[in-house]
Amino acid sequence: MRVVIDGDLCQGQGRCFSIAPSVFGFDELGNGVVLASGELSEGELELARLAEANCPEHAVGVVE
Amino acid sequence: MTIEKTPVADFATDFDHTDPAWVADPYPIWEDLRQRCPVAHTERYGGAWFPATHAGVTQIAKDTENFTSRTVIMNDGRPDELALPSPIGVAPPITSDPPFHQIARKLILPAFSPGAINPLEPQVRALCRSLLDRLEGRDVVEASWDYARLIPPSVIRQMLGFPEADTDVFIDVVHTITESVDLPEDERIAAFEPIEEYFVAQIEDHQANPRDDLTTFLLNAEIDGQKLAVEHVFGTMILILVAGIDTTWSAVGSSLWHLAQNPSDLERLVSEPDLMPVAVEEFLRFYAPVTMARLVKHDMEYLGVPMKEYDWILLGFPAANRDPAAFADADRFVIDRAENRHVAFGLGIHRCAGSNLARLELRVALEEFIARYPRFTLADPDQVTWSQGQIRGPRRLPIRVG
Protein backbone atom coordinates (compact mmCIF):
# COMPACT_ATOMS: atom_id res chain seq x y z
CA MET A 1 0.00 0.00 0.00
CA ARG A 2 1.19 3.52 -0.67
CA VAL A 3 -0.28 7.00 -0.40
CA VAL A 4 -0.56 9.53 -3.21
CA ILE A 5 -1.66 13.14 -3.56
CA ASP A 6 -3.04 14.21 -6.92
CA GLY A 7 -1.30 17.53 -7.45
CA ASP A 8 -3.92 18.64 -9.98
CA LEU A 9 -6.71 18.20 -7.44
CA CYS A 10 -4.93 19.36 -4.26
CA GLN A 11 -5.86 22.93 -3.32
CA GLY A 12 -4.12 23.10 0.05
CA GLN A 13 -7.19 22.38 2.17
CA GLY A 14 -4.77 21.14 4.81
CA ARG A 15 -6.72 18.18 6.12
CA CYS A 16 -4.20 15.43 5.27
CA PHE A 17 -1.19 16.87 7.08
CA SER A 18 -3.31 17.81 10.10
CA ILE A 19 -4.78 14.32 10.43
CA ALA A 20 -1.66 12.33 9.53
CA PRO A 21 1.39 14.53 10.12
CA SER A 22 3.79 11.58 9.93
CA VAL A 23 2.51 10.66 6.46
CA PHE A 24 1.82 14.06 4.87
CA GLY A 25 3.53 17.41 4.97
CA PHE A 26 3.08 20.67 3.09
CA ASP A 27 5.05 22.69 0.58
CA GLU A 28 5.79 26.40 0.44
CA LEU A 29 2.29 27.16 -0.89
CA GLY A 30 0.60 25.00 1.73
CA ASN A 31 -0.28 22.18 -0.66
CA GLY A 32 -0.05 18.63 0.63
CA VAL A 33 2.97 16.43 -0.03
CA VAL A 34 3.60 12.78 0.82
CA LEU A 35 6.39 12.44 3.40
CA ALA A 36 6.33 8.73 4.05
CA SER A 37 8.39 6.50 1.84
CA GLY A 38 8.40 2.71 1.93
CA GLU A 39 5.95 0.61 3.91
CA LEU A 40 3.54 2.38 6.19
CA SER A 41 2.91 1.09 9.68
CA GLU A 42 -0.61 -0.06 10.56
CA GLY A 43 -1.17 3.15 12.50
CA GLU A 44 0.06 5.33 9.66
CA LEU A 45 -2.09 3.47 7.18
CA GLU A 46 -5.15 4.04 9.33
CA LEU A 47 -4.41 7.76 9.57
CA ALA A 48 -3.74 7.96 5.83
CA ARG A 49 -7.14 6.39 5.15
CA LEU A 50 -8.73 8.90 7.48
CA ALA A 51 -6.98 11.71 5.59
CA GLU A 52 -8.30 10.25 2.33
CA ALA A 53 -11.83 10.27 3.73
CA ASN A 54 -11.53 13.89 4.84
CA CYS A 55 -10.03 15.56 1.78
CA PRO A 56 -12.73 17.82 0.32
CA GLU A 57 -10.99 17.80 -3.06
CA HIS A 58 -10.66 13.99 -3.22
CA ALA A 59 -6.96 14.53 -3.85
CA VAL A 60 -5.61 11.97 -1.35
CA GLY A 61 -5.46 8.30 -2.25
CA VAL A 62 -4.34 5.11 -0.54
CA VAL A 63 -3.55 2.67 -3.34
CA GLU A 64 -2.21 -0.87 -3.82
CA MET B 1 -30.39 53.95 4.23
CA THR B 2 -31.73 50.47 3.75
CA ILE B 3 -33.99 49.67 0.83
CA GLU B 4 -37.38 48.36 1.91
CA LYS B 5 -37.90 44.81 0.78
CA THR B 6 -41.01 42.77 0.32
CA PRO B 7 -41.17 39.58 2.38
CA VAL B 8 -40.24 36.36 0.61
CA ALA B 9 -43.30 34.38 -0.44
CA ASP B 10 -41.52 31.23 -1.60
CA PHE B 11 -37.78 30.69 -1.27
CA ALA B 12 -37.77 28.40 -4.33
CA THR B 13 -38.82 31.18 -6.69
CA ASP B 14 -38.17 34.40 -4.77
CA PHE B 15 -35.29 33.73 -2.36
CA ASP B 16 -33.45 36.48 -0.50
CA HIS B 17 -30.53 35.68 1.79
CA THR B 18 -31.20 38.89 3.72
CA ASP B 19 -34.80 37.90 4.52
CA PRO B 20 -35.38 37.74 8.29
CA ALA B 21 -36.40 34.06 8.13
CA TRP B 22 -33.17 33.12 6.30
CA VAL B 23 -31.08 35.23 8.68
CA ALA B 24 -32.72 33.68 11.76
CA ASP B 25 -32.51 30.02 10.69
CA PRO B 26 -31.62 29.16 7.09
CA TYR B 27 -31.20 25.40 7.55
CA PRO B 28 -34.86 24.32 7.22
CA ILE B 29 -35.16 26.58 4.16
CA TRP B 30 -32.19 24.88 2.50
CA GLU B 31 -33.48 21.40 3.35
CA ASP B 32 -36.83 22.29 1.80
CA LEU B 33 -35.10 23.62 -1.33
CA ARG B 34 -33.01 20.46 -1.66
CA GLN B 35 -36.17 18.42 -1.77
CA ARG B 36 -38.10 20.71 -4.10
CA CYS B 37 -35.76 22.40 -6.61
CA PRO B 38 -32.84 21.87 -6.04
CA VAL B 39 -31.69 25.15 -7.67
CA ALA B 40 -33.71 28.07 -6.31
CA HIS B 41 -34.23 31.26 -8.29
CA THR B 42 -35.04 34.88 -7.53
CA GLU B 43 -35.67 38.00 -9.58
CA ARG B 44 -34.19 40.03 -6.75
CA TYR B 45 -30.62 41.36 -7.16
CA GLY B 46 -31.25 41.50 -10.88
CA GLY B 47 -31.67 37.73 -11.07
CA ALA B 48 -29.93 35.02 -9.05
CA TRP B 49 -29.69 31.25 -8.57
CA PHE B 50 -29.02 29.28 -5.40
CA PRO B 51 -28.00 25.62 -5.66
CA ALA B 52 -28.92 23.98 -2.34
CA THR B 53 -27.09 20.67 -2.80
CA HIS B 54 -23.49 19.64 -2.20
CA ALA B 55 -23.28 18.37 -5.78
CA GLY B 56 -24.55 21.63 -7.28
CA VAL B 57 -22.28 23.80 -5.15
CA THR B 58 -19.29 21.59 -5.96
CA GLN B 59 -19.91 21.68 -9.69
CA ILE B 60 -20.16 25.48 -9.84
CA ALA B 61 -17.26 26.10 -7.44
CA LYS B 62 -14.95 24.08 -9.70
CA ASP B 63 -16.27 25.47 -12.98
CA THR B 64 -14.33 28.58 -13.97
CA GLU B 65 -15.28 28.18 -17.63
CA ASN B 66 -18.94 28.99 -17.13
CA PHE B 67 -18.76 31.21 -14.04
CA THR B 68 -16.65 34.22 -13.15
CA SER B 69 -15.50 35.39 -9.71
CA ARG B 70 -15.15 39.04 -10.72
CA THR B 71 -17.63 39.98 -8.03
CA VAL B 72 -18.15 37.66 -5.09
CA ILE B 73 -20.57 39.67 -2.96
CA MET B 74 -24.09 39.73 -4.37
CA ASN B 75 -25.55 43.21 -4.25
CA ASP B 76 -28.46 45.02 -5.77
CA GLY B 77 -28.47 45.67 -9.44
CA ARG B 78 -27.55 43.41 -12.28
CA PRO B 79 -23.89 43.80 -13.25
CA ASP B 80 -23.08 44.41 -16.89
CA GLU B 81 -19.84 44.22 -18.83
CA LEU B 82 -18.98 47.91 -18.39
CA ALA B 83 -19.54 47.92 -14.66
CA LEU B 84 -17.39 44.88 -14.11
CA PRO B 85 -13.78 45.32 -13.14
CA SER B 86 -11.03 43.84 -15.28
CA PRO B 87 -10.29 40.10 -15.07
CA ILE B 88 -7.95 40.89 -12.16
CA GLY B 89 -10.92 42.07 -10.11
CA VAL B 90 -10.92 44.53 -7.23
CA ALA B 91 -9.45 42.13 -4.69
CA PRO B 92 -7.11 39.60 -6.30
CA PRO B 93 -7.03 36.63 -6.23
CA ILE B 94 -10.56 36.06 -4.86
CA THR B 95 -12.05 38.24 -7.61
CA SER B 96 -9.72 36.97 -10.33
CA ASP B 97 -10.35 34.34 -12.96
CA PRO B 98 -7.75 32.12 -14.63
CA PRO B 99 -5.14 32.62 -15.89
CA PHE B 100 -4.36 35.71 -13.75
CA HIS B 101 -5.89 34.07 -10.69
CA GLN B 102 -3.10 31.53 -10.34
CA ILE B 103 -0.40 34.21 -10.52
CA ALA B 104 -2.04 36.34 -7.84
CA ARG B 105 -2.77 33.35 -5.64
CA LYS B 106 0.74 31.88 -5.78
CA LEU B 107 1.98 35.26 -4.69
CA ILE B 108 0.07 35.31 -1.40
CA LEU B 109 -0.13 31.60 -0.51
CA PRO B 110 3.36 31.45 1.07
CA ALA B 111 2.28 34.17 3.53
CA PHE B 112 -0.65 31.98 4.65
CA SER B 113 0.89 28.52 4.47
CA PRO B 114 1.12 26.45 7.66
CA GLY B 115 4.82 27.22 7.74
CA ALA B 116 4.05 30.95 8.03
CA ILE B 117 0.91 30.69 10.17
CA ASN B 118 1.79 28.03 12.78
CA PRO B 119 4.42 30.25 14.46
CA LEU B 120 1.67 32.82 15.21
CA GLU B 121 0.03 30.53 17.76
CA PRO B 122 1.69 32.06 20.86
CA GLN B 123 0.64 35.60 19.91
CA VAL B 124 -2.93 34.51 19.10
CA ARG B 125 -3.09 32.75 22.47
CA ALA B 126 -1.72 35.79 24.31
CA LEU B 127 -4.30 37.98 22.55
CA CYS B 128 -7.19 35.70 23.54
CA ARG B 129 -6.00 35.63 27.14
CA SER B 130 -5.74 39.40 27.31
CA LEU B 131 -9.26 39.78 25.91
CA LEU B 132 -10.56 37.33 28.52
CA ASP B 133 -8.66 39.21 31.25
CA ARG B 134 -10.69 42.30 30.36
CA LEU B 135 -13.92 40.36 31.05
CA GLU B 136 -12.73 39.17 34.47
CA GLY B 137 -15.27 39.52 37.26
CA ARG B 138 -18.39 39.51 35.09
CA ASP B 139 -21.11 36.88 35.44
CA VAL B 140 -22.34 37.49 31.91
CA VAL B 141 -19.89 38.19 29.07
CA GLU B 142 -20.60 39.35 25.53
CA ALA B 143 -18.83 36.42 23.84
CA SER B 144 -19.37 37.75 20.33
CA TRP B 145 -18.94 41.52 20.61
CA ASP B 146 -16.32 41.61 23.39
CA TYR B 147 -14.38 38.44 22.52
CA ALA B 148 -14.80 36.74 19.12
CA ARG B 149 -15.12 40.04 17.25
CA LEU B 150 -11.84 41.39 18.59
CA ILE B 151 -9.57 38.45 17.78
CA PRO B 152 -9.24 38.47 13.95
CA PRO B 153 -8.64 42.22 13.44
CA SER B 154 -5.79 42.27 15.94
CA VAL B 155 -4.14 39.26 14.32
CA ILE B 156 -4.45 40.68 10.80
CA ARG B 157 -3.42 44.16 11.84
CA GLN B 158 -0.25 42.66 13.31
CA MET B 159 0.36 40.66 10.12
CA LEU B 160 -0.04 43.74 7.93
CA GLY B 161 2.15 45.81 10.23
CA PHE B 162 -0.46 48.54 10.81
CA PRO B 163 -0.51 50.57 14.05
CA GLU B 164 -2.08 48.91 17.08
CA ALA B 165 -4.18 52.02 17.68
CA ASP B 166 -6.01 51.38 14.40
CA THR B 167 -7.68 48.10 15.37
CA ASP B 168 -11.08 49.78 15.74
CA VAL B 169 -10.76 51.40 12.31
CA PHE B 170 -10.32 47.93 10.83
CA ILE B 171 -13.51 46.65 12.32
CA ASP B 172 -15.50 49.56 10.85
CA VAL B 173 -13.92 49.00 7.45
CA VAL B 174 -14.94 45.37 7.31
CA HIS B 175 -18.48 46.13 8.44
CA THR B 176 -18.80 48.70 5.69
CA ILE B 177 -17.83 46.27 3.00
CA THR B 178 -19.44 43.00 3.99
CA GLU B 179 -22.67 44.28 5.44
CA SER B 180 -23.37 47.03 2.91
CA VAL B 181 -25.21 44.63 0.63
CA ASP B 182 -28.36 46.74 0.90
CA LEU B 183 -26.72 50.12 0.33
CA PRO B 184 -27.23 51.89 -3.01
CA GLU B 185 -24.07 51.87 -5.12
CA ASP B 186 -23.18 55.56 -4.63
CA GLU B 187 -23.35 55.16 -0.85
CA ARG B 188 -21.16 52.07 -1.04
CA ILE B 189 -18.58 53.96 -3.09
CA ALA B 190 -18.70 56.94 -0.72
CA ALA B 191 -18.20 54.63 2.24
CA PHE B 192 -15.08 53.29 0.56
CA GLU B 193 -13.29 56.64 0.15
CA PRO B 194 -11.90 57.05 3.68
CA ILE B 195 -10.86 53.40 3.61
CA GLU B 196 -8.79 53.93 0.48
CA GLU B 197 -7.21 57.06 1.96
CA TYR B 198 -6.18 55.21 5.09
CA PHE B 199 -4.66 52.33 3.16
CA VAL B 200 -2.74 54.54 0.78
CA ALA B 201 -1.21 56.30 3.80
CA GLN B 202 -0.18 52.94 5.27
CA ILE B 203 1.26 51.77 1.94
CA GLU B 204 3.27 54.98 1.61
CA ASP B 205 4.62 54.59 5.13
CA HIS B 206 5.73 51.05 4.32
CA GLN B 207 7.33 52.19 1.06
CA ALA B 208 9.36 54.71 3.05
CA ASN B 209 10.05 52.33 5.96
CA PRO B 210 10.06 48.70 4.78
CA ARG B 211 9.78 46.11 7.57
CA ASP B 212 9.10 42.43 8.10
CA ASP B 213 5.35 42.27 7.56
CA LEU B 214 2.70 41.40 4.99
CA THR B 215 2.44 44.94 3.61
CA THR B 216 6.16 45.04 2.84
CA PHE B 217 5.88 41.50 1.43
CA LEU B 218 3.17 42.64 -0.99
CA LEU B 219 5.08 45.78 -1.93
CA ASN B 220 8.18 43.72 -2.71
CA ALA B 221 6.31 40.97 -4.55
CA GLU B 222 6.91 40.75 -8.28
CA ILE B 223 5.09 39.30 -11.26
CA ASP B 224 7.42 38.72 -14.22
CA GLY B 225 10.03 40.99 -12.68
CA GLN B 226 7.53 43.83 -12.16
CA LYS B 227 6.39 45.14 -8.77
CA LEU B 228 2.64 44.88 -8.23
CA ALA B 229 0.45 47.79 -9.22
CA VAL B 230 -0.68 49.80 -6.19
CA GLU B 231 -4.30 48.83 -6.98
CA HIS B 232 -3.27 45.18 -6.76
CA VAL B 233 -1.59 45.70 -3.37
CA PHE B 234 -4.56 47.71 -2.11
CA GLY B 235 -7.04 45.15 -3.46
CA THR B 236 -5.23 42.26 -1.82
CA MET B 237 -5.12 44.13 1.50
CA ILE B 238 -8.86 44.73 1.29
CA LEU B 239 -9.30 41.06 0.56
CA ILE B 240 -7.21 40.04 3.56
CA LEU B 241 -9.29 42.27 5.83
CA VAL B 242 -12.69 41.42 4.44
CA ALA B 243 -12.03 37.73 4.14
CA GLY B 244 -10.29 37.36 7.45
CA ILE B 245 -12.33 39.27 10.00
CA ASP B 246 -16.12 38.81 9.89
CA THR B 247 -15.61 35.22 8.80
CA THR B 248 -13.48 34.02 11.70
CA TRP B 249 -15.45 36.17 14.15
CA SER B 250 -18.55 34.33 12.96
CA ALA B 251 -16.98 30.88 13.27
CA VAL B 252 -15.79 31.55 16.83
CA GLY B 253 -19.16 33.04 17.79
CA SER B 254 -21.21 30.19 16.34
CA SER B 255 -19.03 27.62 18.06
CA LEU B 256 -19.43 29.33 21.45
CA TRP B 257 -23.19 29.65 20.80
CA HIS B 258 -23.29 25.90 20.24
CA LEU B 259 -21.25 25.03 23.32
CA ALA B 260 -23.34 27.34 25.51
CA GLN B 261 -26.37 25.22 24.66
CA ASN B 262 -24.80 21.77 24.50
CA PRO B 263 -23.19 21.01 27.87
CA SER B 264 -22.23 17.46 26.89
CA ASP B 265 -20.13 18.75 23.97
CA LEU B 266 -18.56 21.37 26.24
CA GLU B 267 -17.76 18.72 28.85
CA ARG B 268 -16.08 16.53 26.26
CA LEU B 269 -13.85 19.35 25.09
CA VAL B 270 -12.93 20.18 28.69
CA SER B 271 -12.10 16.56 29.54
CA GLU B 272 -10.61 15.60 26.14
CA PRO B 273 -8.59 18.58 24.88
CA ASP B 274 -7.08 16.40 22.13
CA LEU B 275 -10.52 16.23 20.55
CA MET B 276 -10.38 19.94 19.67
CA PRO B 277 -8.96 19.66 16.11
CA VAL B 278 -11.67 17.16 15.15
CA ALA B 279 -14.34 19.30 16.85
CA VAL B 280 -13.10 22.39 14.99
CA GLU B 281 -13.81 20.64 11.67
CA GLU B 282 -17.35 19.83 12.81
CA PHE B 283 -17.89 23.43 13.95
CA LEU B 284 -16.72 24.48 10.48
CA ARG B 285 -19.06 22.04 8.77
CA PHE B 286 -22.12 22.70 10.88
CA TYR B 287 -21.74 26.46 11.21
CA ALA B 288 -19.81 27.29 8.03
CA PRO B 289 -19.99 31.09 7.96
CA VAL B 290 -19.19 31.91 4.34
CA THR B 291 -21.41 31.99 1.28
CA MET B 292 -19.74 33.23 -1.92
CA ALA B 293 -21.13 34.58 -5.17
CA ARG B 294 -20.31 34.02 -8.82
CA LEU B 295 -21.61 35.46 -12.08
CA VAL B 296 -22.84 33.39 -15.00
CA LYS B 297 -20.54 33.99 -17.99
CA HIS B 298 -23.02 33.25 -20.77
CA ASP B 299 -26.54 32.02 -21.44
CA MET B 300 -26.75 28.29 -20.84
CA GLU B 301 -28.78 25.41 -19.48
CA TYR B 302 -26.98 24.38 -16.29
CA LEU B 303 -28.03 22.05 -13.46
CA GLY B 304 -31.33 21.84 -15.30
CA VAL B 305 -32.12 25.56 -15.17
CA PRO B 306 -31.87 28.29 -17.82
CA MET B 307 -29.06 30.59 -16.65
CA LYS B 308 -28.52 33.96 -18.35
CA GLU B 309 -25.32 35.94 -18.79
CA TYR B 310 -24.60 37.97 -15.59
CA ASP B 311 -27.16 36.17 -13.47
CA TRP B 312 -25.82 35.88 -9.93
CA ILE B 313 -25.01 32.55 -8.33
CA LEU B 314 -25.21 32.49 -4.56
CA LEU B 315 -22.73 29.74 -3.72
CA GLY B 316 -23.85 28.30 -0.40
CA PHE B 317 -21.03 26.29 1.10
CA PRO B 318 -22.99 26.21 4.40
CA ALA B 319 -25.91 24.61 2.58
CA ALA B 320 -23.64 22.04 0.91
CA ASN B 321 -22.34 21.10 4.36
CA ARG B 322 -25.87 20.14 5.50
CA ASP B 323 -26.73 18.00 2.47
CA PRO B 324 -27.70 14.48 3.61
CA ALA B 325 -26.50 13.16 0.25
CA ALA B 326 -22.95 14.11 1.25
CA PHE B 327 -22.91 13.65 5.05
CA ALA B 328 -24.34 10.99 7.36
CA ASP B 329 -26.66 12.62 9.90
CA ALA B 330 -26.03 15.91 8.11
CA ASP B 331 -28.31 17.87 10.43
CA ARG B 332 -26.77 16.49 13.60
CA PHE B 333 -23.71 18.06 15.23
CA VAL B 334 -21.30 15.18 15.92
CA ILE B 335 -18.37 16.54 17.88
CA ASP B 336 -16.12 13.56 17.10
CA ARG B 337 -17.18 13.10 13.47
CA ALA B 338 -14.27 11.13 12.01
CA GLU B 339 -15.13 11.50 8.33
CA ASN B 340 -15.88 15.09 7.50
CA ARG B 341 -15.25 16.25 3.96
CA HIS B 342 -16.81 19.65 4.67
CA VAL B 343 -16.45 22.54 2.24
CA ALA B 344 -16.48 25.48 4.68
CA PHE B 345 -13.41 26.94 2.97
CA GLY B 346 -14.77 26.44 -0.52
CA LEU B 347 -13.58 24.07 -3.20
CA GLY B 348 -11.26 24.26 -6.17
CA ILE B 349 -8.94 27.10 -7.10
CA HIS B 350 -10.59 29.66 -4.79
CA ARG B 351 -10.13 27.59 -1.61
CA CYS B 352 -9.90 30.15 1.21
CA ALA B 353 -6.27 31.28 1.20
CA GLY B 354 -6.52 32.07 4.90
CA SER B 355 -7.86 28.70 6.02
CA ASN B 356 -4.77 27.83 8.05
CA LEU B 357 -5.01 31.14 9.91
CA ALA B 358 -8.76 30.74 10.42
CA ARG B 359 -8.33 27.26 11.91
CA LEU B 360 -5.58 28.49 14.21
CA GLU B 361 -7.68 31.40 15.48
CA LEU B 362 -10.80 29.28 15.89
CA ARG B 363 -9.00 26.51 17.79
CA VAL B 364 -7.05 28.82 20.08
CA ALA B 365 -10.05 31.09 20.72
CA LEU B 366 -12.12 28.09 21.83
CA GLU B 367 -9.30 26.51 23.85
CA GLU B 368 -8.71 29.72 25.78
CA PHE B 369 -12.40 30.47 26.36
CA ILE B 370 -12.96 26.94 27.68
CA ALA B 371 -9.83 27.07 29.83
CA ARG B 372 -11.13 30.26 31.43
CA TYR B 373 -14.77 29.16 31.65
CA PRO B 374 -15.13 25.35 31.76
CA ARG B 375 -18.86 25.77 32.24
CA PHE B 376 -21.05 28.35 30.55
CA THR B 377 -24.58 28.74 29.25
CA LEU B 378 -26.59 31.08 27.06
CA ALA B 379 -27.61 34.01 29.26
CA ASP B 380 -30.62 35.06 27.22
CA PRO B 381 -31.49 33.39 23.90
CA ASP B 382 -33.71 36.35 22.95
CA GLN B 383 -30.72 38.69 22.94
CA VAL B 384 -28.72 36.66 20.42
CA THR B 385 -28.66 38.35 17.02
CA TRP B 386 -27.29 37.04 13.72
CA SER B 387 -25.48 38.87 10.93
CA GLN B 388 -27.25 39.54 7.66
CA GLY B 389 -25.56 38.87 4.35
CA GLN B 390 -23.09 36.32 3.04
CA ILE B 391 -21.23 35.89 6.33
CA ARG B 392 -23.28 34.15 9.00
CA GLY B 393 -22.56 34.32 12.71
CA PRO B 394 -23.89 35.67 16.01
CA ARG B 395 -23.29 39.38 16.53
CA ARG B 396 -24.67 39.59 20.07
CA LEU B 397 -24.07 36.59 22.29
CA PRO B 398 -24.50 37.10 26.04
CA ILE B 399 -23.04 34.08 27.83
CA ARG B 400 -23.39 33.32 31.53
CA VAL B 401 -20.04 32.28 32.93
CA GLY B 402 -20.55 32.80 36.65
Image (tube, rainbow, N blue to C red):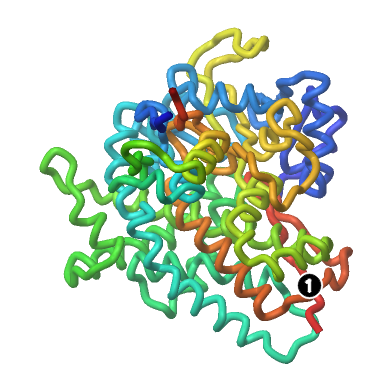
Q: Name the quarter where the C terminus of chain B is drawn.
A: bottom right
Q: Amino acid at mark 1?
A: Pro
Q: Is B166 located above or below residue A60 in the figure?
A: below
Identify the residue shown where x is 81% and y is 29%.
B11
Identify the residue shown where x is 61% and y is 49%.
B281
**Where is mark 1, residue-wise?**
B398
Residue B308: quadrant of the picture: top right
Mark 1 residue element: strand
Identify the residue shown where x is 42% and y is 36%.
A11
Image coords of residue B285 (percent x, y): 66, 44
Image coords of residue B124 (percent x, y): 48, 72
Q: Nearer the viewer, residue B77 or B115?
A: B115
Residue A32: quadrant of the picture: top left
Q: How many marks?
A: 1
Q: On the picture, is B84 further left or further right than B368? A: left
Q: Is B120 located above or below residue B297 in the figure?
A: below
Q: On the picture, is B211 further left or further right than B400? A: left
Q: Nearer the viewer, residue B308 or B283?
A: B283
Q: Is B178 located above or below residue B211 in the figure?
A: above
Q: Chain of mark 1?
A: B
Residue at far left of view: B225
Identify the residue shown where x is 82% and y is 61%.
B262
Mark 1 crowdedness (10 Å alpha carbons): few <14, some 14-19, many ≥20: many
Q: Nearer the viewer, residue B304 or B170?
A: B304
Image coords of residue B349 (percent x, y): 42, 33
Q: On the picture, is B307 further left or further right than B116? A: right
Residue B183 visible in the snapshot: no
Image coords of residue B357 (percent x, y): 46, 57
Residue B364 visible in the snapshot: yes
